[in-house]
Amino acid sequence: MQAITGSIVALVTPFLPDGQIDYQGLRKLVDWHVEQGTQCIGVVGTTGEAPTVAVDEHIEIIRVAVEQAAGRVPVMAGCGANSTAEAIHLARSAKSVGADCQLQVVPYYNKPTQEGQYQHFKQIAEAVGDLPMVLYNVPGRTVASMDHDTVLRLTQIPGIVGIKEATGDLARAQWLLRDVPEGFAVYSGDDLTAVALMLCGGHGNISVTANVAPAQMQALCKAAMAGARDEAMRLQKQLLPLHKSLFVESNPIPVKWAMQRMGLCDGDLRLPLTPLSKVHHAVVENALKSVGLI
């Protein structure tokens, strides 16, 4: 796999009012991101509401995204599960429909130990080693967190090529950048701190904000990764209100409201997620206006 760098959108999964997946809407979003300069399409992760899509829907979302991308940009397929067997099944399926790599989150709810996490990712890599794996550490979602030493152990396993570091802890990120082997990618998974991680040597950002501001996020990533601090920070200061507003409620609730407001897709969600509270509408609207998106 050619190294993936830059702005990677953590794409929403569009739904129709009846709760079915809007595959035509998904195709339109993929085309838009290619046009806007997004470097990679990430599907069925946290922002893609992976916990509320059935396994067959999960695989079909990946297939449609791959088909629509048509080799123009790579597709990073979310294949995480809190069952190792299910994660392997999803990864094999993602490989079979043409995904370029897989994103594997720390198993949630069952709170595995560090050894349990190591064995989980090791078994997936051994079973589906021909589909490069990006680890995903997001303890705010999973409760369990992947320790630094566990990441380093996993870097030695063939097929594990990077990590989405979504803690927002820049000290942790710097230690990773210092200690991981050459060629192992460290991506931010936190829009508010991504610019700093990339200025420290990170390889890109798996972004929620890119759902609504893809061109701006790609420009920010390009500047930060080139060490152009002033330009990167100019863009970051412009985007800060947007980064913040997209987390006034649980992701992807605010970003789906924002996308509907921009006419990109319907804002429908699947329960237990509910539409953005009216009290927050003005906050998100003003953030979109501040960036010139509406």
Image: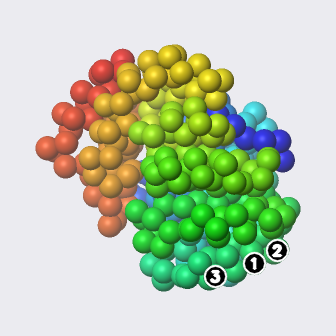
Callout 3: 10 Å neighbours few (<14), some, many (20+)? Answer: few
Answer with the quarter of the image where residue 215 lies.
top right
Q: Height in image: 165 above or below 153? A: above
- Residue at the left extreme, as displayed: 279
Residue at 84% over, 64% down: 158
Residue 169, given in percent of the width and then of the height, sits at 46, 51
Counting labels gives 3
Say whether residue 133 is left or right of residue 112.
Answer: right
Name the foreground residue: 20 vs 149.
Answer: 149
| Label 1 secondary element | helix
- Label 3 and label 2: CA atoms lie apart by 16 Å
- Label 1 and label 2: CA atoms lie apart by 5 Å
Labelled pair 1, 2 in contact (Cβ < 8 Å) = yes
The answer to whether one can see residue 179 in this image is yes
Labelled pair 1, 3 in contact (Cβ < 8 Å) = no
Labelled pair 3, 2 in contact (Cβ < 8 Å) = no
Give the numbered dot on residue 123. 1
Question: Can you tell which of label 1 and label 3 is closer to the viewer?
Answer: 3
Residue on which disc 3 sits: 115
Residue on which disc 2 sits: 126
Of the image marks 3 and 2, the number of the one nearer the N terminus:
3
Residue 100, given in percent of the width and then of the height, sits at 77, 50
Q: Which amino acid lies under the numbered mark 2 shown in the image of this protein?
A: Glu
